[in-house]
Image (cartoon, coloured by chain):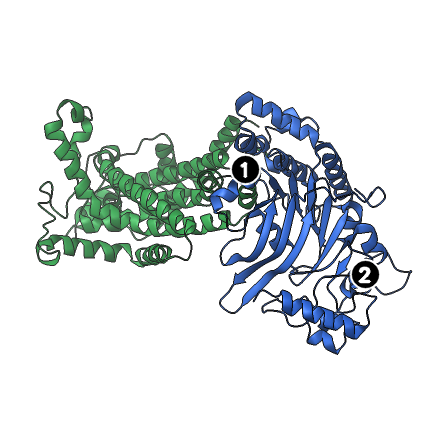
Chain colours: A blue, B green
């Protein structure tokens, strides 16, 4: 789970629980078409934690909402597939999707303070999930809800279950939200910045809780955050997103040890506290561009310290960082590392034109 | 603090409010230009009779004594006799004659606002930026923008010439024969059971009473209806985009449950003060509407009493209005504690 205990699981015989292929979610506005998620692919295997990091506006949350089928007009999934346990979710009606939501995939949102309906008791909201997904009602549901609250570490659950969200503290509310997600008995838990709104000590407690729950229930977790420290703590594998694209995928150990994409390097250098005393904190200049057209260039090039001329003309695709590594890919013209720059550029060019779908 | 202690405190705290309101009322009617003696006497009275009447009415006593008498009588619900409108009759009697018409009017106009405005607003909020939303919203704004007195006159004018203007549809003979401008006949109310025992006679009376009040109720309810529609729409939009609705959606709750369970109750919270605030609007607005439609209710009575200087009647009516308003405010807080658990009884 955390980087110390990571064992490279042999996944040759195992099916991914969630497999995303070339997913593109676009938003149609009056001015432009925004490709909030633009051709991303990744897998999540049972029992592992996959982190998704990136700046604000890089498409992390839209990815999560696409998986949940919660993308609302004017946005829609335009291309690609989301396979959950071998079943493609793209193209399902809202009604069909609702059966998956909660049942197989549950989601914990960013802001625990507003994720619970203020006018119903916490117990009522947990029992709503239990009724929908496990068919429990009445006394049985109450008991199960108390058990769930205890499982997420809420003391005196029997009394707390009758309380309203405003009577809970921030950390307790996030625990209650997690309990509510668990009430669906999911196999995949999507956490959209679940710790961002919490203070650091509570943050650590929630991460620990997720860790324990994962071990107990063999949950797969997709963890979205912009906090590299949190990712280092919790993720087995990490996808780095930039302007709607996955720019680097690696195990957490590799990503923090040998980051390859210049963007990842920049992100890691901008973590406070990793510098010598007195040194200025590193920042990546500029903002994430709005991905509003089919890319024929590297979207990170304008901010990239290592950019060269071809970066403006060739769209990089995800490639292994060198010949011998397969679980570490980067979408950058500098890779594969073992080829010359010209060869690498040509390789990307052929892949991106040959592989393009339109 | 329990719910009942809370309301006991609220009621005790409302006493100074009522006191303040009645004091202001007294100052306005006694220190203002109203001269009841002149109103009783008419324009041709001689000075001696004028002075005599003033003395009879107690207007020659020191002001502070008049003030304490006034307060004492109101707070013991001794509303006194009318001076000008119905000399010799008690204010209580007059109010009892006129109040049912106003209550009948208020009942229907609140009903129209509640059962047309709120559902329409919720519908518009649930289907934002569609054609029906634009129609409802635009209609709400237009409806809200038409002033009561103007709309009332237009209604009266159109309905009295309905054969010419509405393609032969004759309002006054439709269903039951009624006048356009008339106080509603509420005689059947004294025996509500007759609706069951003697349906043949009483049902047409009921329908007639509803028909008589309908145009006035629509006019009076129109502005609050537009208000409720617009606020209902905003409230629904705000709620439906909130995080807890998304969370509910993420756990697979059906759209119907989301609307009825998660959105509805939260959207009602901002509507509560709007709805209770209508009590005020109905009292103020009914003066105009009752005058145009000749309903002769409390609004009309208050207006007549005020311009003719019938001080006990004005004071009594104001006192009753103040009590109604304070009462609705307490009711509003009570509704809040029921709908929104975050509203506590504690002082913190």
Image quadrant in which you'd find residue A285? bottom right
Residue, disc 2 = A323
**Disc number placed over residue A124 in the picture, else none:** none
Q: From the viewer's perspective, is A200 left or right of B276?
A: right
- Near mark 1 (Cα within 10 A), the count class, few <14, some 14-19 or many ≥20, is few
Residue B316, given in percent of the width and then of the height, sits at 31, 38
- Near mark 2 (Cα within 10 A), the count class, few <14, some 14-19 or many ≥20, is few
Residue B15, given in percent of the width and then of the height, sits at 45, 35
Chain of the residue displaying label 1:
B
Taking A285 as reference, is B22 above or below it? above
Secondary structure found at label 2: loop
Residue, disc 1 = B343
Q: Nearer the viewer, residue B266 or A221?
A: A221
Chain of the residue displaying label 2:
A
Quadrant occupied by the C terminus of chain A:
bottom right
Q: From the viewer's perspective, is B304 left or right of A135?
A: left
Between marks 1 and 2 in the image, the one whose residue lies nearer the viewer: 2
Taking A286 as reference, is B214 above or below it? above
What residue is shown at x 38% (from left), y 32% (from top)?
B75
Residue A352 visible, this angle: yes
């Amino acid at each position: 789970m955390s980087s110390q205990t990571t064992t490279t699981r042999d996944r040759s015989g195992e099916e991914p629980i969630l497999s995303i292929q070339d997913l593109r979610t676009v938003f149609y506005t009056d001015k432009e078409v925004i490709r909030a998620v633009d051709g991303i692919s990744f897998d999540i295997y049972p029992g592992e934690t996959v982190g998704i990091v990136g700046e604000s506006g890089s498409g992390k949350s839209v990815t999560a909402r696409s998986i949940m089928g919660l993308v609302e007009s004017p946005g829609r999934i335009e291309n690609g597939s989301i396979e959950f346990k071998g079943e493609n979710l793209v193209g399902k009606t809202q009604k069909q999707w609702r059966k998956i939501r909660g049942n197989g995939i549950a989601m914990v949102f960013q802001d625990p303070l507003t994720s619970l309906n203020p006018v119903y008791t916490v117990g009522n909201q947990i029992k709503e999930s239990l009724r929908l997904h496990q068919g429990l009602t009445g006394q049985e549901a109450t008991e199960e809800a108390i058990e769930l609250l205890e499982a997420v570490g809420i003391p005196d659950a029997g009394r707390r279950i009758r309380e309203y969200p405003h009577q809970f503290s921030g950390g307790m509310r996030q625990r209650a939200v997690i309990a509510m997600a668990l009430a669906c008995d999911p196999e995949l838990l999507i956490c959209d910045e679940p710790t961002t709104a919490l203070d650091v000590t509570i943050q650590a407690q929630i991460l620990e809780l997720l860790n324990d729950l994962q071990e107990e229930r063999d949950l797969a977790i997709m963890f979205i955050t912009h906090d590299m420290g949190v990712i280092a703590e919790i993720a087995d594998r990490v996808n780095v997103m930039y302007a709607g694209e996955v720019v680097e995928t690696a195990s957490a150990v590799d990503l923090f040890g040998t980051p390859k994409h210049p963007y990842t390097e920049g992100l890691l250098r901008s973590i406070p506290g990793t510098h010598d005393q007195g040194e200025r904190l590193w920042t990546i200049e500029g903002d994430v561009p709005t991905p509003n057209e089919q890319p024929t260039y590297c979207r990170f090039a304008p901010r990239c310290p290592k950019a060269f001329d071809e970066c403006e003309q060739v769209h990089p695709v995800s490639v292994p960082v060198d010949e011998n590594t397969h679980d570490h890919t980067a979408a950058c013209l500098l890779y594969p590392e073992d080829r010359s720059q010209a060869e690498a550029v040509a390789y990307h060019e052929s892949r991106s034109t040959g592989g393009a779908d339109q | 603090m329990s719910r009942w202690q809370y309301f006991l405190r609220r009621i005790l705290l409302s006493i100074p409010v009522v006191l303040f309101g009645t004091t202001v009322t007294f100052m306005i009617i006694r220190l203002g230009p109203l001269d009841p003696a002149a109103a009783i006497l008419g324009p041709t009275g001689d000075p001696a009779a004028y002075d005599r009447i003033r003395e009879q009415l107690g207007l020659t006593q020191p002001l502070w004594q008049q003030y304490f008498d006034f307060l004492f009588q109101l707070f013991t619900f001794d509303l006194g006799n009318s001076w000008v409108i119905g000399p010799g009759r008690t204010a209580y009697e007059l109010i009892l004659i006129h109040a049912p018409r106003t209550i009948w009017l208020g009942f229907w106009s609140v009903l129209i606002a509640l059962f047309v405005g709120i559902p329409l607003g919720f519908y518009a909020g649930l289907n934002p930026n569609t054609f029906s939303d634009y129609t409802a919203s635009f209609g709400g704004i237009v409806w809200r923008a038409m002033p009561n007195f103007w709309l009332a006159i237009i209604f009266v004018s159109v309905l009295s010439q309905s054969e010419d203007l509405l393609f032969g549809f004759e309002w006054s003979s439709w269903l039951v024969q009624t006048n356009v401008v008339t106080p509603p006949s509420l005689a059947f109310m004294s025996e509500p059971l007759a609706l069951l025992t003697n349906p043949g006679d009483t049902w047409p009376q009921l329908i007639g009473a509803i028909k008589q009040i309908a145009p006035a109720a629509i006019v009076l309810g129109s502005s609050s209806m537009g208000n409720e529609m617009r606020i209902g729409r905003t409230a629904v939009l705000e709620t439906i985009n909130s995080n807890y609705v998304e969370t509910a959606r993420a756990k697979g709750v059906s759209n119907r449950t989301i609307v009825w369970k998660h959105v509805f109750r939260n959207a009602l919270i901002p509507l509560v003060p709007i709805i209770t605030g209508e009590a005020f609007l109905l009292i103020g607005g009914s003066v105009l509407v009752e005058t145009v439609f000749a309903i002769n209710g409390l609004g009309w009575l208050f207006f007549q009493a005020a311009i003719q200087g019938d001080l006990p009647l004005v004071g009594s009516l104001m006192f009753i209005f103040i009590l109604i308003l304070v009462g609705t405010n307490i009711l509003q807080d009570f509704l809040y504690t029921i709908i929104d658990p975050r509203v506590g009884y504690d002082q913190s």
